[in-house]
Image (tube, rainbow, N blue to C red):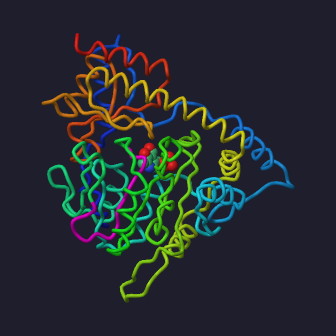
Amino acid sequence: MFHVNDHFQKLPGSYLFAEIARRVKVYQQEHPEADIIRLGIGDVTKPLVPAVIEAMHKAVDEMGQQETFRGYGPDFGYDFLVNAIREGDYTSRGVELAFDEVFISDGAKSDVGNIQELFSEDAVIAVTDPVYPVYVDSNAMAGRAGEYVGDRWNKLVYLPCNAENDFVPPVPDRPVDVIYLCYPNNPTGTVLTKEQLKVYVDWAKENGAIIIYDAAYRAFINTPNVPLSIYEVEGAKEVAIECNSFSKTAGFTGTRCAYTVVPHEVCGLDSKGNKIELNAMWKRRMATKFNGVSYPIQRAAAAVYTEEGQKQIKEVIDAYMANAKIIRESLAEQGFTVFGGVDAPYIWLKVPEGMTSWEFFDLLLDKCHIVGTPGSGFGPSGEGYFRLTAFNTLEKTRQAMERVSKLKEA
Ligand code: PLP
């Protein structure tokens, strides 16, 4: 019999969201009358904006006409989208990118999961803790995480982020090759200022490491001096790859379009000590394993950068952020310690003293019929915290917070 990749067998069994779904299902069966409000979702709920839909319709019609039909597109994305991104997301922020430094893809999840293919098998990986699980699991599947012992992988370097350090991760205390950073952060909803981010850029430069920067939530940033891109930090083009997505920016979670920036300056060493451009490696990888995002979807994504598109997506984001404000303020009024929710659609709260994240999950489900996400599911430093999201409707969000206000009486 053939052999399978052993590293898959090391992944801890019950995935966080599967366990949440199981507990909610059991509760709903036992309490069929309970009107459950889901504030655990990391998915958008509002429809695509008119500018996007219009562009998508038009492109679909083009596909039905001989003169305008298109087959395979360029491997790394159509010019019109690559240029819209360069101009709209970078030149406008003082960052110049070459045309071939931007790669269009079907999702930031694919890109942050696949990017590890570029690193050596024994590369040492650092992640912030708590963390978006894809960075960890994709490296675990490739054998870089070691063994899962207790609540952690024994070869990963964890950078704890908690109330004590104001959610600013410490730089690694030992040599590492790759650091995954995500800002605005999922799950904590916190951000780093330009000065704080520069500490990592400088550390990466001094220590020969690379930063994988996930900016999937950049559109939610409101605070001045919080960079939308890591390339706003001096020197970052030498040490960082940046992944972005239209999923949260423009409601593309079900539509699928994203992009990754791999600057020419970012280089690593091969086993013979030669300097290798990661841009060339990513090109090779994408050309071999990916055949592009469909033409109508790339047209739809490009419409995000039109004047109308920008105005319309801003309204949607403002609506989610109004929910975030309601959650943040209501919880604070109830005496909870809350973080995030200002530059991100996630609110991270401290669970009541003496409780675990899962105990608080059960309490909130039982007493308020609210589903959130236990912090411990995002890594060891998430224990004692809980994530709520701003992606539900205004009405449901308000209703949920009314229920929380009665929690103490319950
Ligand atoms: N990165 C982070 C931090 C996320 O939270 C998510 C989705 O929740 C993604 C990436 C996935 O983005 P996409 O829908 O583009 O695959």
Q: Position of residue 89 (x, y in %)?
A: 60, 54
Residue toward you, 254 or 94 = 94
Q: Is residue 72 left or right of residue 194?
A: right
Q: Say above or below: 121 vs 375.
A: below
Residue range (magenta): 171-186
Q: Residue at 36% across / 32% down in the picture?
A: 388
Q: Quadrant of the N terminus?
A: bottom left
Q: Position of residue 11 (x, y in %)?
A: 26, 53
Specify the quadrant of the image occupied by residue 15. Answer: top left
Q: Say above or below: 168 vs 188.
A: below
Q: Residue at 35% across / 42% down in the picture?
A: 187
Residue 405 colored in magenta in the image:
no
Q: Main secondary structure of the magenta part?
A: loop
Q: Residue at 51% across / 75% down in the picture?
A: 265
Residue toward you, 220 or 222 = 222
Residue toward you, 139 or 238 = 238
Q: Residue at 87% across / 55% down in the picture?
A: 67
- The tally of labels here is 0
Q: Is residue 322 left or right of residue 80?
A: left
Q: Position of residue 330 (x, y in %)?
A: 36, 21
Q: Position of residue 63 (x, y in %)?
A: 78, 50
Specify the quadrant of the image occupied by residue 124. Answer: bottom left
Q: Say above or below: 340 vs 244.
A: above
Q: Say above or below: 202 vs 10.
A: below
Specify the quadrant of the image occupied by residue 376. Answer: top left
Q: Quadrant of the C terminus?
A: top left
Which residue is at the far right? 67
